[in-house]
Structure formats: structure tokens, C-alpha cells
Amino acid sequence: MPVKVVATGVFDIIHIGHAHFLNAAKVHGDHLTVIVANDATVRKMKGEPILSDKRRSEVVSQLKPVDEVVIGRTGDMLDIIVEDIKPDVIALGFDQRLFTTKELADKLLERGLEVKVVRLEEMEQDLAGSRKIISKILKIYRKKYSSE
């Protein structure tokens, strides 16, 4: 029986941190399903997304470690995990802090799903974050065009 792993995220501007995260998640099983946050969730948690959830899921689906992509639901984000995917492992990024690994495992157990929850290590890289990339682009743009 293949071991099913789930990873979640926004994946707005794909960068090396995403590649590291998804490769590290895939190590924990045979089949990696990625839940891409829907636009409403992104707006609520981080602000306006650059790309729509449909476009973000299309890009993520092309990445080598990814076997399946689904767009998250509005409302209780655990519903899709419990009702549809039923993973064996959930891989959390080092900066995903909605739950501790124990809290998430306990919440899923309350819903009848025994899941191993792992926290992945941080990647040391200066542009391993969409907001860092946007900030650098703005800095370069301002420097180049502020004198015109």
C-alpha cells in the first residue's frame, strides 16, 4: 500500500524554497498530494495573491515530486484532508505555524484519522520566500527607475 503524503501552501511565486519543501515532503512517502490554498484563504491570511489558485495549482502540478494537486476549500481546511485525501503523513513547512505537529495530529485523530505529522527543516537561502522575492524586485525597480 503506497504511503500518502500531503503538503500545503500558497505557492504564489514558485521559488527554491518550494522545491526544497516539496522534495523533502516526498521523502516521507510514495504519493505526494499538494493542497494549494484557494484565493479566499490567501486573501485572508497573506493578502492578494499574484496568481489565481487555478494558475498556482497548474504550476505546482508540473513540479517533479508532485503526484497530485488539489485546490483547498473555503472554511475548515481539515475537511479536505479528512474527507478526500486521508493521508498517512502531513508535511509542514518550517514556517507553517497554524498548528504544532502535535496539535494537528490530535485534531485529525479527533476526526478519526491517525496521521503522522512532520515538520520539515528550514532551507538557508536568501530568496526562499515569495515576499522576499517581491521585496527584492521592488528594491531593484526603485533603484533603477527612481532617478528618471
Image: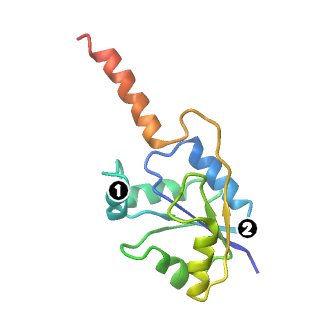
Q: Judge the density around disc 1: few (<14), some (14-19), many (≥20) Cα neighbours within 10 Å.
A: some
Of mark 1 and mark 2, the one earlier in the sequence is 2
Q: In the image, residue 63 lies at what x, y percent?
A: 58, 53
The amino acid type found where label 2 is placed reads Gly
Is residue 148 depicted above or below 124 in this figure? above
In the picture, measured across the screen, residue 26 lies left or right of residue 33, that is: right
Outermost residue on the left side: it is 148
Please tell me which residue is depicted at 36% across the width and 63% down the height of the picture: 41
Q: Judge the density around disc 2: few (<14), some (14-19), many (≥20) Cα neighbours within 10 Å.
A: some
Q: Mark 2 — residue?
A: 29
Q: Mark 1 — residue?
A: 52
Marks 1 and 2, how far apart at CA: 29 Å
Picture disc at residue 34: none
The quarter in which the N terminus is drawn is: bottom right
Q: In the image, residue 124 lies at what x, y percent?
A: 64, 37
Q: What's the image's color scheme? A: rainbow
The amino acid type found where label 1 is placed reads Ser
Q: In the image, residue 100 lies at what x, y percent?
A: 59, 65
